[in-house]
Image (cartoon, grey):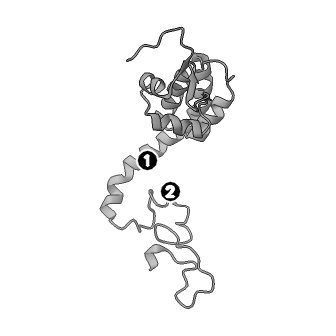
């Protein structure tokens, strides 16, 4: 990993990419989404402050656990722009994400546990399909795995109230 002397307080996009492990295109994308910021030189080149390294690490760690970029941006907006996110910052922000991650884990476990049954069905039009109809929302009223979109003014073949299994 290339070392950058301490006396250098700003990094080029190439230096930031090399040090962070993120592609230049990813850094440009992060900047376009407001996750990191740069200043422009008189030659219109991007320059990033050194604390951007920690912000990029923060973004990438949050992405790895499935946190959406909009949520990451909101979290970073709570931090002062002129300082590097700390371990305490990460602990506070990640604690807020814990319940969302726990819910995703529950959903993935349910998917894993029912995947074999669903593959065995083949058409996903069971009366109670845990993948297409989680918690059997429509099971009391209709059959099929999902409702078709209602069409206005449709004739005798109207899909109003019909399901994919009825077609």
User: In the picture provided, is 128 more to the left or to the right than 84?
Assistant: left
| Contact flag, marks 2 and 1 (Cβ < 8 Å) | yes
Q: Quadrant of the N terminus?
A: top left
Q: Quadrant of the C terminus?
A: bottom left
Per the image, label 2 sits on a secondary structure element best described as helix
| Camera-side residue of 59 and 36 | 36
| Camera-side residue of 56 and 50 | 50
Q: Which residue in the structure is indicated by mark 1?
A: 110
Where is residue 52 drawn, in percent x and y? 56, 23
The residue under the point 46% across, 23% down is: 15
Asked which quadrant contains residue 43, the reply is: top right
Q: Which residue in the structure is indicated by mark 2?
A: 134
The residue under the point 43% across, 33% down is: 23
- Looking at the image, residue 137 lies above or below residue 35: below
Per the image, label 1 sits on a secondary structure element best described as helix
> What is the total number of numbered labels drawn onto the structure image?
2
Where is residue 123 drawn, in percent x and y? 36, 68
Report if residue 160 is visible in the image. Answer: yes
Which residue lies most toward the left here? 120
Crowd band around label 1 with a 10 angstrom C-alpha radius: few (<14), some (14–19), many (20+)? some
Crowd band around label 2 with a 10 angstrom C-alpha radius: few (<14), some (14–19), many (20+)? some
Where is residue 161 drawn, in percent x and y? 57, 77
Which residue lies most toward the bottom here? 156
| Camera-side residue of 23 and 79 | 23
- Looking at the image, residue 53 lies above or below residue 152: above
Q: CA distance from mark 2 to mark 1?
A: 10 Å
The residue under the point 50% across, 34% down is: 27
């Amino acid at each position: 990993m290339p070392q950058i002397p301490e006396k250098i307080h700003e990094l080029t996009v190439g230096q930031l990419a090399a040090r962070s492990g993120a592609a230049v295109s990813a850094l440009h994308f992060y900047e376009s989404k407001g996750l990191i910021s740069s200043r422009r030189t008189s030659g219109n080149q991007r320059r990033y402050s050194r604390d951007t390294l920690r912000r990029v690490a923060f973004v990438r760690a949050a992405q790895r656990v499935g946190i959406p970029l909009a949520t990451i941006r909101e979290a970073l907006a709570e931090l002062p722009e002129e300082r590097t996110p700390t371990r305490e910052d990460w602990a506070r922000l990640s604690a807020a994400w814990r319940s969302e991650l726990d819910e995703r884990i529950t959903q993935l476990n349910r998917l894993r546990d029912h995947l074999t049954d669903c593959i065995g069905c083949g058409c996903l039009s069971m009366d109670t399909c845990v993948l297409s109809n989680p918690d059997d929302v429509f099971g009391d009223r209709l059959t099929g795995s999902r409702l078709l979109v209602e069409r206005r003014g449709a004739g005798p073949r109207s899909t109003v109230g019909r399901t994919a299994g009825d077609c």
